[in-house]
Amino acid sequence: MTPRFDVAIVGAGIAGASLAAEIAPHASVVVLEAEDQPGYHATGRSAAFWSETYGGPLIQPLTSASQVALSPFVEPLGSLHIGRAGDAAAIERFLAAFADSGVVLEPRDPRAMIPGLRDEWRLGVWEPSCTYIDVAALHQHYLARARAAGARLTVAAALRSASRHAGDWALDTAAGPFRAGILVNAAGAWADPVAGLAGAAPLGIAAFRRTMVQLRTDPAPPSRLPHVGHIGGSFYFKPEGADRLWLTPHDEIPTAPCDAQPEPIDVATAIDRLEQVVEWRVAGVDRKWAGLRSFAPDRRPVYGFDPLTPGLFWCAGQGGFGIQTAPAAAKLAAALLLGIAPDPTLAAIDPAAYGVGRLRA
């Protein structure tokens, strides 16, 4: 007999796992993951930091509302946004954008904080609240919570087709058939293709490749190095252990949904940009990898029922901020899906800002 659930979630990355943890105490849930392990494409390749300004002012309320829930999984880091003389206007816009947000931002001379920083990088803004996130522990926490509440995780279960019959979804997957009252599209870069399988129009969620490099420098990075990013968005780097850096050229290369791999030109670009910022010599590259980020056209996440496809719920388009917003986003999405009042911690957040309707006009 085909197993039947109240809710079937497609995707077991941070979006699907956190939502499953929130709704499993209230409904029967199955999480269908296409890969052999959860979080393979994006969650498992995250740069692993929490920054209230990352993603901009429209994302900041979700990030700030997630801070308390993330506290068991974070360590102090701090973030320094830096620029040259030509970036002065960008610095001013950045400060103005968060002026009334409650985020603490302090103008600083970055040369006093980063030994070896080239002299022209003399503009800076210090964001002390930025932290390192243990992404693997957070992801496993949500999966464990979901399982403890009765949710079922099925891997190697790529969705093949979805059709609506008598108020239920009939789902054909690589792991066999399932039935569900509600189908949640938490498929990340595959969100639009999954919607197509369900007979829904796409929202224009596009996938982008981002490259990361772990490297050693001579001299080694200074102790207590914060996260450091260009105010213009051309790079960021952060410490990894005592003597390594994680570095990215902050690239967003359009791509089809895939198992993203780093391209040599992107690795070379990252190293070149670093060498234009600091006087440290790159002594070796230990690892390089790429991950997928997926955005709706307005770069806001999408949470809610599709107004044109009954029983289809979107939890997608989380870009590069899905980890740091996971607690608040999952609570918001769960309230919308279950038809209950939002958690009090979300009182300052307007669900309509992230609704599907804005993209169906």
Image: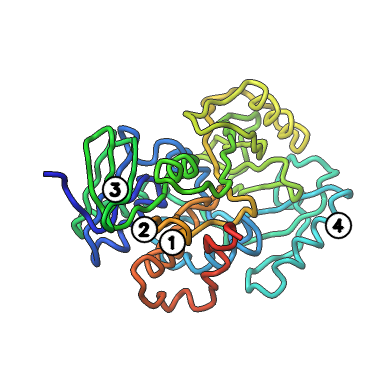
> In terms of sequence position, does the residue under pointer 3 or pointer 1 come before the other?
3
CB within 8 Å, label 4 to label 3: no
**Nearest to viewer (mark 2 / mark 4):** 2
Q: Amino acid at mark 3?
A: Val
Estimate the spatial distance between the alpha carbons at disc 4 and disc 1, rounded to whole Å.
40 Å
**Nearest to viewer (mark 4 / mark 3):** 3
Determine whether 47 is above or below 59 in the image.
above
Estimate the spatial distance between the alpha carbons at disc 3 and disc 1, rounded to whole Å.
18 Å
**Residue identifier under label 4:** 89
Determine whether 353 is above or below 257 in the image.
below
**Nearest to viewer (mark 2 / mark 3):** 2
Is 287 positioned to the left or the right of 271 in the image?
left
Estimate the spatial distance between the alpha carbons at disc 2 and disc 3, rounded to whole Å.
16 Å
**Which image quarter is the N terminus in?**
top left
Looking at the picture, tell me which residue is in the foreground, 106 or 210: 210
Estimate the spatial distance between the alpha carbons at disc 2 and disc 1, rounded to whole Å.
7 Å
How would you rate the neighbour count of disc 4 (Cα within 10 Å): few for under 14, some for 14-19, many for 20 or more? few
**Residue identifier under label 1:** 305
CB within 8 Å, label 4 to label 1: no
Residue 140: % across, % down: 31, 49
Residue drawn 46% across the image and 52% down it: 133
**Residue identifier under label 3:** 31
Q: Amino acid at mark 1?
A: Phe
**Nearest to viewer (mark 4 / mark 1):** 1
Q: Quadrant of residue 234?
A: top right
> In terms of sequence position, does the residue under pointer 4 or pointer 1 come before the other?
4
How would you rate the neighbour count of disc 3 (Cα within 10 Å): few for under 14, some for 14-19, many for 20 or more? many
Residue 290: % across, % down: 54, 31
